[in-house]
Image (cartoon, rainbow, N blue to C red):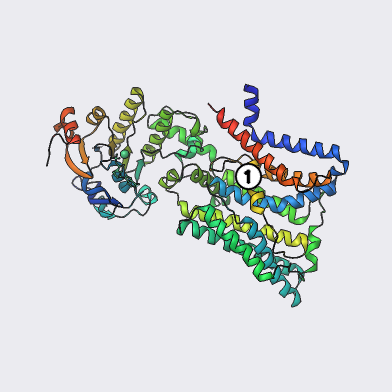
Amino acid sequence: MSNSTTPLYEVRNIGKQYGSVVALDGVNFKIHAGEVIGLVGDNGAGKSTLVKALSGAHQPSSGEILLEGKPVVWKSPHDALEAGIETLYQDSGLAPDLSVSANVFLGREKVVSGILGKLGFLSQKQMDKEAHEDLERVGIAVPASNRSVSQLSGGQRQAVAIGRAVSWARKVIILDEPTNHLGARQAAEVLQIIKRAKERGLGVVFISHTLPHVLQVTDRIVVLRLGRVVADAPTSTFDAEKLLGTITGLIETK
Amino acid sequence: MNRIREVLKNQQFILVLALAVMVAFFSIKNPVFFSIPVFGNILSDWAPVVLMAVGETYVIMSGGIDLSVGSTVGLSGVAAAFVMRSMTTAGQNQNFTILVGTFIAMGVGLLIGLVNAFLITKARMVPFVATLATLGAARGLCIVTTGGGPIGEGPEKAISYSVPWFGPLNTPGIIIIVIVAICGLFMHKAKLGRYTYAIGSNSFAARSAGINVKLHLAKIYVLSGVLSGLAGMYLYIRLGSGSPSSGASGELMAIAAVVIGGASLSGGVGRMSGTVLGSLILTTVTSGLIIIGVAPNWNQVVVAVLIAGAVFIQGFRTWTKD
Ligand SMILES: Nc1ncnc2c1ncn2[C@@H]1O[C@H](COP(=O)(O)OP(=O)(O)O)[C@@H](O)[C@H]1O
Ligand SMILES: [Mg+2]
């Protein structure tokens, strides 16, 4: 058990360059268990780049990542997943030609018992059933498990992607613009899912352009501008106007 | 309109229908066509094509392409022929010699597959260019090592294995059918195929789901190489020698079989049964045209029409999706 003063997940002085573009410049932030962090910033502020560093999809050019106080290096998303960190990427992390359950179980397939299982033969029925249950448990109205994702609507796809991430997460869940392309009712469902994840003691990183959502569901807000953290404070210290001002730079914070 | 849509959605049904129509057509044109020896001949042509095409199916499903399969057939057959010639000169047991030859052929395929895998996953070359390079290199090696002629003087018994005994099938043919079935099961029932589809469908999603995409792609190109190596050995057994030109244009046949089978060249869509039927259609047409007396040069035109037809149907299916 980590005590409450050791952050669950922390980045220190993270930098990332794409050629001459500095996407992240000395970013620091912490997240505790059972805490929802809102990560906001204008387009191009570096949110998705930070997500990719947190999830192992990219390696940062500089800086340190600590999980429960211990430095970690993610060589691939596989490492971060193994450590209990799930990510929903903005640019959809689903394989459209695969079924719903194949996507939910992608990379963590259930195999049949015995030698065939060792050879990688899949227990498809089991996965169809469990995918359905997992999605239901996190509160998602589920389309049939064996439907191809390409046949789902944008909202349904997003729901499957969120359900996949939430049902597998053990420590941290990172959601990059999960309410994009969603209607009001579906977006409200996603916020409910975030609250439930928090109640389960997960650390949640919630990225969104919809500021009312961020103000409604987060405990703390980190504002990025041009690759730097320009504000990091409890949500209660922000109102919509101040948050918008901080994002756009109309309100100087540092 | 709905009817047509439903029928066209079932690729397998169309393929079986096309095959049946072809068999009927050729049989009516020349009744000799409908016979065990002719079917045996078609299956002998089909066996090496389906081996290449099965590997190609994995590669194409993953979103890649393997142009080196035909050259791999050539080089593996030639390498096996050299080894089997020395073993025969040394008076080795014939069956043992053939077994060793088979492993040599598979080994050469494995090596070429590893080179492809290295070029694609480590040197980050696109599959088209990487396998075009190995296509050229392997065929070049065939010519250089043989001087252009076939390598014979191997075990005399080899060619006897190509005699059909189970209806139109011979022993290598039966083995190949079993291998194809196993590859199909791995494609549709196991992780190997699941990851292949995932990578071809969205490789970023596959990677972020924790799949080692590079390792998986390496496996697929190696599989393709090994299967082509087996096809090289099969042609050795059929001809009784290793010819430097065997498997020439095999990549076109393999890719055509996969496409006629309904796969998408951009990956993620297709089935092994489609490839099996696609390759069977190709070899049936080739034999059928000869038997009804059409000049062999028409063959390529007919194959082209088949591919165009398959792509048209695929386009039609996508177009009517929503
Ligand atoms: N793969 C990439 N190659 C080059 N530049 C990139 C790449 N990804 C992001 N960037 C750049 O990095 C900056 C931050 O982008 P991003 O993290 O996507 O911002 P956000 O998600 O906050 O909109 C932008 O200037 C963007 O153009
Ligand atoms: Mg973004």
Q: B117 left or right of A253?
A: right
Disc 1 crowd, CA 10 A, few/some/many (<14, 14-19, 20+): many
Q: A149 left or right of A22?
A: right
Q: Position of residue B197 (x, y in %)?
A: 53, 44
Q: Nearer the viewer, residue A243 or A167?
A: A243
Q: Name the residue under label 1.
A: B258
| Ligand 2 located in image quadrant | top left
Q: Position of residue B241 (x, y in %)?
A: 75, 65
Disc 1 residue type (three-letter): Val
Q: Where is residue A97 in the image (x, y as percent from the top left)?
A: 51, 37
In the displayed structure, would residue B294 be above or below residue A64? above
Q: Where is residue A214 in the image (x, y as percent from the top left)?
A: 24, 31
Taking the spot 54% from the left edge, 61% from the top edge, the residue there is: B114
Taking the spot 32% from the left edge, 38% from the top edge, the residue there is: A176
The chain letter for the residue carrying disc 1 is: B
- Count of labels in the image: 1
Q: B147 left or right of A195?
A: right
Which quadrant does the N terminus of chain B fall into? top right
Whether residue A121 is visible to the viewer of this picture, yes or no, is: no
